Image (cartoon, grey):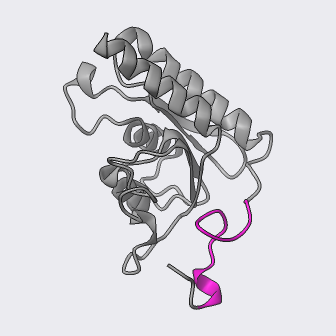
């Protein structure tokens, strides 16, 4: 998709420049924090995905790891749980100015939650060729009829995120 007007150019999506991280952080340090959350899932035998929501001031408003197996809840993806925690912490279901950082490209369900939460941006690590709904299988954050379209930036510490997932699934196959 090629932007046809200036308002369509969104930093960090498929074009544009990288936005600055929230104060007190680098994008790498935020992704390292999300990776730590993801690693905490290894002992619970949950898919190692971690997500956090950061306010414009640099405060961690929500953080979570995937727990659909343990919660018996198909919606218990790291992104959804981090959004829920941030909404509760900030006292609002809308999260304007916030950025979600997640180790794996969000799926369609999570993309919908991100749009409805009105986050400003999404930073993700590894691509998800099968279910990724940001750029891999669907450009879900770029759908033209949505009232809100967060900027997005993928590949942040992508190799480390992909290695963690690959090693997890390889161990399960053996």
In which quadrant will I find the C terminus?
top left
Q: Quadrant of residue 81?
A: top left
Residue nearer the viewer, 126 or 12: 126
Tell me how many marks there are. 0
Residue nearer the viewer, 86 or 5: 5
Rendered view: 138 above or below 61: below
Q: Residue at (58%, 58%) from the top-left corner? A: 121
* Highlighted range, magenta: 5-18
Rendered view: 11 above or below 67: below
Q: Is residue 120 left or right of residue 38?
A: right
Q: Quadrant of residue 133?
A: bottom left
Rendered view: 123 above or below 72: below
Q: Position of residue 27 (x, y in %)?
A: 71, 43
Q: Position of residue 108 (x, y in %)?
A: 32, 54
Q: Position of residue 98 (x, y in %)?
A: 59, 53
Q: Residue at (34%, 58%) from the top-left corner? A: 112
Residue extending farthest to the bottom is 5
Q: Is residue 28 left or right of residue 98?
A: right
Within the magenta stretch, is there residue 118? no
Residue extending farthest to the left is 72
Residue extending farthest to the front is 174
Q: Position of residue 59 (x, y in %)?
A: 67, 40
Q: Quadrant of residue 160?
A: top right
Rendered view: 172 above or below 152: above
Q: Residue at (27%, 28%) from the top-left corner? A: 68
Q: Main SS of the magenta segment?
A: loop
């Amino acid at each position: 998709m090629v932007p046809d007007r200036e308002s369509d150019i969104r930093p960090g999506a498929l074009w544009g420049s990288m936005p600055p991280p929230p104060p007190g952080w680098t994008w790498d340090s935020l992704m390292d924090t999300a990776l730590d959350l993801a690693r905490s899932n290894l002992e619970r035998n949950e898919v190692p995905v971690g997500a956090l929501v950061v306010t414009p001031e640099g405060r961690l408003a929500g953080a979570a790891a995937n727990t659909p197996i343990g919660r018996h809840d198909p919606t218990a993806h790291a992104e959804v749980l981090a959004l829920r925690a941030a909404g509760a912490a900030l006292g609002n279901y809308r999260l304007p100015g916030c950025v979600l950082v997640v180790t794996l490209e969000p799926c369609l369900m999570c993309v919908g939650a991100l749009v409805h939460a009105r986050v400003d941006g999404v930073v993700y690590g590894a691509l998800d060729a099968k279910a990724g709904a940001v750029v891999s299988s669907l450009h879900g954050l770029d759908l033209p009829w949505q009232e809100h379209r967060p900027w997005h930036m993928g590949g942040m510490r992508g190799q480390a995120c992909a290695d963690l997932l690959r090693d997890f699934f390889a161990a399960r196959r053996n």
